[in-house]
Amino acid sequence: MAIYKLRGFISIASRLCFCFILLLNVALINSCGYTIQGSKDIPFQSITIGNITNKTYEPKLQDKLLSSLNQQLMLYGFDVSKNARYRLEGEINRFNLRILSEIGLTAVEYEVDIGGAFTLIDTETFKRYPIKVFKPYMTVFTTQDRLTNVLIQKEIYTQKALDELSKEIVQGIIYFSPTN
């Protein structure tokens, strides 16, 4: 009889503990400031991508960023058009490919670092709003292959860094735009 009562107590205690942990998680998630944003929550519907300049020695970064920005803006629900009130402009001012480690005088681990400065321009009032990019975009890759394979990996990871930079720019437009 005592064992049966002990099992019931453990079962009730574990249920209460589970409910408490579940309630605590719900409270933490709701109080952290994160919100789910839909396409109805974007500050304006259309945007123009203006001049993106490349101030680095790495060729074609501006074209790759332009393509990635276009894709990310549409993914977040913006209409990218030439006649929009708001225009995004900017420059890529940092591109570094660093060797992080080597084995036997051969580089095996690399880091791609990309940064820039971007501005949202209201074409009706001509006010300029800087887009805050809070973190540098670095991706790391490891390879011991031939130089051609290293260059292929560099291109892949450069595109990944540009995609992350594009996401950060679009999030900056959504959360820190002039209409918010």
Image (tube, grey):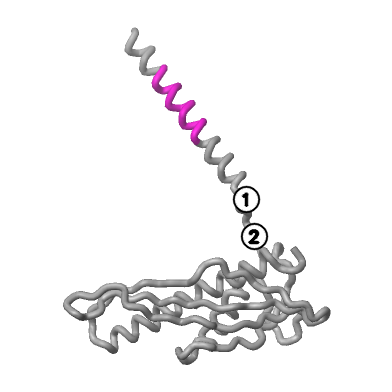
Q: Quadrant of the N terminus?
A: top left
- Label 2 sits on a secondary structure element that is loop
The quadrant in which residue 153 appears is bottom left
Numbered circle sitting on residue 37: 2
Instruction: List x then y, in percent, for residue 28.
Output: 56, 42
The quadrant in which residue 145 appears is bottom left
* Image vertical order of residue 132 relative to residue 114, above or below: above
Look at label 2 and name its amino acid.
Gln
Residue stretch rendered in magenta on the structure: 9-21
Query: Residue sitting at 70 percent across and 78 percent down?
Result: 47
Instruction: Check residue 18 for magenta coloring.
Output: yes
Look at label 1 and name its amino acid.
Gly
Q: Residue furthest left?
A: 104
Local crowd size for mark 1, using a 10 Å CA cut-off: few (<14), some (14–19), many (≥20): few
Distance from disc 2 to disc 1, alpha carbons, whole Å, reads 12 Å
Instruction: List x then y, in percent, for residue 98.
Output: 36, 78
Q: Is residue 133 found left or right of 150 in the rendered image? A: right
Query: Residue sitting at 51 percent across and 36 percent down?
Result: 22
Residue occupied by mark 1: 33
- Label 1 sits on a secondary structure element that is loop
Q: Is residue 2 found left or right of 175 in the rendered image? A: left
Instruction: List x then y, in percent, for residue 29.
Output: 57, 45
The secondary structure making up most of the magenta span is helix
Q: Is residue 149 found left or right of 128 in the rendered image? A: left
Q: Quadrant of the C terminus?
A: bottom right
* Image vertical order of residue 121 relative to residue 175, above or below: below
Q: Residue furthest top?
A: 1
Instruction: Check residue 104 for magenta coloring.
Output: no
All told, the count of numbered labels is 2
Query: Residue sitting at 82 percent across and 80 percent down?
Result: 124
Instruction: List x then y, in percent, for residue 51.
Output: 64, 88
The quadrant in which residue 101 appears is bottom left
